[in-house]
Image (cartoon, grey):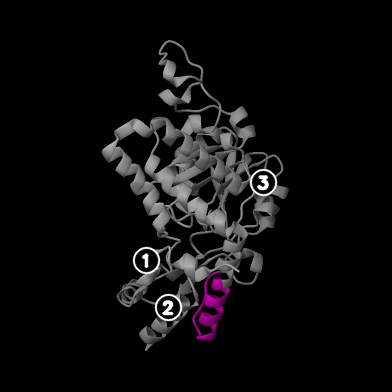
Amino acid sequence: MIDWDSIRRQFPVTSHFAYLNSAAAGPVSIAAYEAAADYYRKMMSDVDVHWNRWLSEREAVRERIAALINAEPDEIAFTTNTSSGMNLIVDALEDRGEVISSELEFPVTTLPWMHRRIPVHLIKPVRGEIRIEDIRAAMTHSTGVIALSHVQFSNGFRSDLEALGKIKGDHLLVVNASQSAGAFAIDVKRMRIDALCATGHKWMLAGYGSGFVYLSRNVLQQSHSRSLGWLSVEDPFAMRNDELRPRHDAAARAELGCPHFAGIFALGAALDLINEIGIQNIQERALNLNRLLTHRLIEDDWKVLSPLQNEKARSAETLIEIERPDEIVRALFRRGVLVTEKPEGIRVATHFFNNEEDIEKLINTLQELRH
């Protein structure tokens, strides 16, 4: 049995808030805070005496990320956010054809392609879902990339990545995993994902300034980096400025200079907790809490805008139709409940550190505000 109450106590925010806002920014645990603070303490007292140890710790974190998504360590690079990761992916794939995406998408999934003047074809949702058959119908001789979020920030729809991988043909599958990494199981090999990016500050609970990108070995072999730093070569400490022998791993493309150790170490501590609990247990916990939430909302006659007709499309995010969402979000905050304001209403996120009391507090407060 997992002691969820003990895990919850590792997140101090839960002592004074019903924090249902991980889709915007997840809280860091005590361990993640200590990992970053310990780095800064050492920089304060010893400066870079620990440089070699830090580099070794960075590689250990890289291995843990690779294991989380069933990738190889050389396919993983550290970034500071989703945008930097997606731009790295576009760098690699900009000559692979037009892009199929969705009207539900977060802009960073589409804008970098458009910035390169690559046409992006947006699939219309049907009852809040992006259907596999519509993606298949959009595939032509001109398209070469399918770029979608695993979980949509807009309404919480969760794509069946394994089904997408099976129908993609010779298209490349690019995944924005910012709303799923840390909460849902991802297997890049089984799902046939070619490239993926995620931030650490949402469901991975590592704070701002952390993230990662995955580029499959196939993508690495068939593309070239547009950017390069002094650490991107085979022997950077030879300090050669008269020859170029670049490395071919993902890190060589993204980690162009000295590492952002604090963000990496916080991400490592967050991954330790994820691994301790187990990503399948986390997914089940987040979904069970979401089921309780949507059941209570419907029971109290709130309109849920997230698609619920297909359980496989359910995520840990719920969009609720509410008038004057700005006022409601402020009123909820004053009563100790944190959610996200959206144009249609409010978005509620249920992560593994949440509990039934958080949901009941939200429901009861909404009922009070309704009258």
Residue stretch in magenta: 289-306
Residue 14 in sight: yes
Mark identifier at residue 139: 3
Position of 84 with respect to 187 (left or right) is left
Across the whole image, how many numbered discs are drawn on residues? 3
> Mark 2: few, some, or many residues within 10 Å (few <14, many ≥20)?
many
Residue at 53% of width from left, 51% of height from top?
177
Q: Amino acid at mark 2?
A: Leu
> Please, is residue 53 above or below residue 265 in the view?
above
Residue at 56% of width from left, 80% of height from top?
295
Mark identifier at residue 362: 2
Q: Is residue 172 magenta?
A: no
| Rendering quarter of residue 13 | bottom left
Q: Sequence order check: which comes first, mark 2 or mark 3?
A: 3
> Mark 1: few, some, or many residues within 10 Å (few <14, many ≥20)?
some
Q: Position of residue 106 (x, y in %)?
A: 47, 54
Q: Amino acid at mark 1?
A: Val
